[in-house]
Image: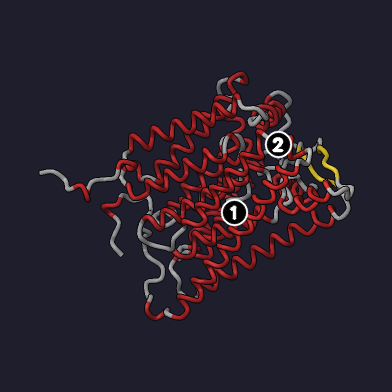
Amino acid sequence: MTTPPSLRPAWYTAPVLLWSAFVIVHFVLGLLNLRAPGYPLGDVSSVYTFWTDQAIVGHYWVGINGPWVYPILAIVPMLAARMFGMSEYSGVWLAMIMVLDAIAFAVIVGWGKRRQNSLVAWWWLGFLLLLGPIALGRIDSVTVPLAIVGVLLVASRPRLAAFILTIATWIKVWPAAIIVAIVISVRERAAVVVTGLITSVLIIAGALALGSGTNVFSFVTEQTGRGLQVEAPIATIWLWGATAGTGTTVYYDTDLLTWQVRGAGVDVASAVTTPLMLLAFLVVAALGALAVRSRARVADILPALSLGFVAAFIAFNKVGSPQYITWFAVPVILGLATTAAGSGRSFRVPAILSAVLAALTQVIYPYLYGYLLSLNPLMLTVITAKDLLLFVLLGWSMWALWREWRRTNASAAENPEWLPEVWPFSALPPEVIPNK
């Protein structure tokens, strides 16, 4: 007996096709990192190797013997890339990121058993390709697949999810935003908080035992004292001002190894970015809390709340590095997977906007970055469009949370099971997930 055509899996759900595309995308991005103009793998092959040489050869450990811009666990993947010697460092780094992405990819598609997530997997591959070599060439590339696995495990294994996300946070701070979103949204918040605290205490205790002292927290103070980076959304105002002869200049900070802006009002703008970021966080958190209080479903809250926190983190950041755009993959994958499972609201708009944002980012970095530094009007237009999209995504997330608050507040009595026991897109095989 043959299967009716209407019941046959679509061609794009075939595991062989999905995994072949995964390999091709990572091969192309790896090749771009190694061969493309603009030195896209520069941080990995120069800065990361310098820090690991300091540790192995000079016995000076960043974050232990002195302050560092990253949390203490960031040194672990940097050291891991040395496993086959320094001559192979870049290749090993790219292979390591590909393995981490493969694990996240497997979780998305349920190890080949969750075909409804095939379009989610295709979106991620397209997003990586649009973003370009920067998608693999920074420490953020380690944290993104970890965060993807964490959010997709939170329903079925909240403690494991909290552990993974906490580890990711101690590599690069941004996954803390996802943890906060989970704590606000889910019933198992106590398990998430306790696991995160225990994991953090163990990491801090290990660093203190190695003699770090307060250096284990130096990533906080190192960020607060830096200037306004060229790619920061708020810096675009001064970039345009420079073309009008306002006296703004672009310079290279040799301590932080970044391009920054200098001019009238820049110091004030740099100082207010953190308070503005905190204010945006509080507004998003308040909307999320109101939606939870009005008995909205987790599937309707967590993706939008995660998106809002990530967008606020980037839109009001004084750094604004191009690799930050990789963070959007986590809330978008979460939202698309929720929709694919027949729960939650459509996440099509953020998915499209994030893909456009990725493409604009690749236009700027690495190929044409020099034109941005020279204040080329066309490149300033591109980065302005990119910055505006960040605020559009932030606004969309706030609107989505407000909508859930107003909608469910009016019909809470009709929605008693507002927080499902198990999310349908959890890591459990489809056949063991109960119907809700």
Image point 58% across, 20% down: which residue? 88
Label 1, secondary structure: give it.
helix
Circle 2/circle 1 CB separation < 8 Å? no
The residue tagged 1 is: 176
Counting other residues with Cα less than 10 Å from the Cα at mark 2, is it few (<14), some (14-19), or many (20 or more)? some
Percent position of residue 202, x then y: 59, 47
Residue closest to the eye, 328 or 80: 328
Numbered mark located on residue 369 in the image: 2
Label 2, secondary structure: give it.
helix
Percent position of residue 304, x then y: 52, 61
Q: Distance of mark 2 from mark 1, alpha carbons? A: 30 Å
Q: Amino acid at mark 1?
A: Ala
Residue closest to the eye, 305 or 402: 402
Percent position of residue 58, x then y: 74, 25
> Does residue 238 sit above or below 12 in this rendering?
below
Q: Amino acid at mark 2?
A: Tyr
Counting other residues with Cα less than 10 Å from the Cα at mark 1, is it few (<14), some (14-19), or many (20 or more)? many
